Amino acid sequence: MTGGFIAAWVAGFAFGVSQRRSTAVEVPDDGEDTAELAEQLAEFLASLSFLVFGAVLLGPALEHLDWRILTYAELSLTVVRMLPVALSLVGTSLALPTVAYIGWFGPRGLASVVFGLLVVEEHVQGVQLLGRAIAITVALSILLHGMSATVLANRYGAWHQKAAAGRPDLREGMPDEGFTAR
């Protein structure tokens, strides 16, 4: 499976290089069509991955649900996920609401599925429990992030608008070119 990930990365890299070379010789293109196709394909494949995940892994995981797995999933979506994001943003001068927003909506569950599949391939002891924990964590992430997306995005947008009006030097209101930690 690891070879498949490397092959996919190399194929994507080669495609990107070929697109840059072909557009330099042919009619100039702003790359929007290619970028849009890549984005739509990525969304489709991610959706397909979650469909397969739900159809194959979630059902059996729910049959063995217990308090330990549920506690782990809750901790993964909060402390285990949000604390490293907050630590990585130290020194950026971003406000606490921004750090919390990035921490909540930042890293997504598809990586957990991929890493879980890598562990399955290596035949690690306890892989069934790990698989259940990943399945419940991803399912809970889909549920909670999906339910909270509109409400929290609106709340963050309102906060940003108010904060930017009162503080012209607000880091979140600055252009993203050359963003560096202060």
Image: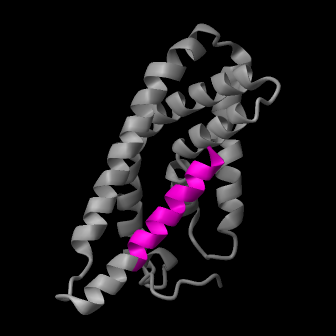
Q: Residue visible at 27% across and 69% down?
A: 34
Decide: is 104 above or below 35: above
Which segment is the magenta one? 1-17
Decide: is 154 above or below 25: above
Q: Residue visible at 69% across and 31% down?
A: 120
Q: Nearer the viewer, residue 128 or 23?
A: 23
Q: Is residue 87 left or right of residue 25?
A: right
Decide: is 139 above or below 174: above
Q: Nearer the viewer, residue 24 or 165?
A: 24
Q: Residue furthest bottom?
A: 25
Residue 127 on image: x %, y %: 74, 25
Q: Quadrant of the N terminus?
A: top right
Residue 81 on image: x %, y %: 65, 47
Q: Nearer the viewer, residue 51 or 146?
A: 51
Displayed quadrant of residue 60? top right
Q: Is residue 34 left or right of residue 56?
A: left
Q: Is residue 67 left or right of residue 162?
A: right
Decide: is 108 above or below 29: above
Residue 173 on image: x %, y %: 42, 78
Q: Nearer the viewer, residue 2 or 72?
A: 2
| Main secondary structure found in the magenta portion | helix
Displayed quadrant of residue 36? bottom left
Q: Quadrant of the C terminus?
A: bottom right
Q: How many marks?
A: 0
Residue 56 on image: x %, y %: 49, 20
Q: Does the stretch in magenta take in 177?
A: no
Q: Residue furthest left?
A: 27
Q: Is residue 154 visible?
A: no
Q: Residue furthest top?
A: 63
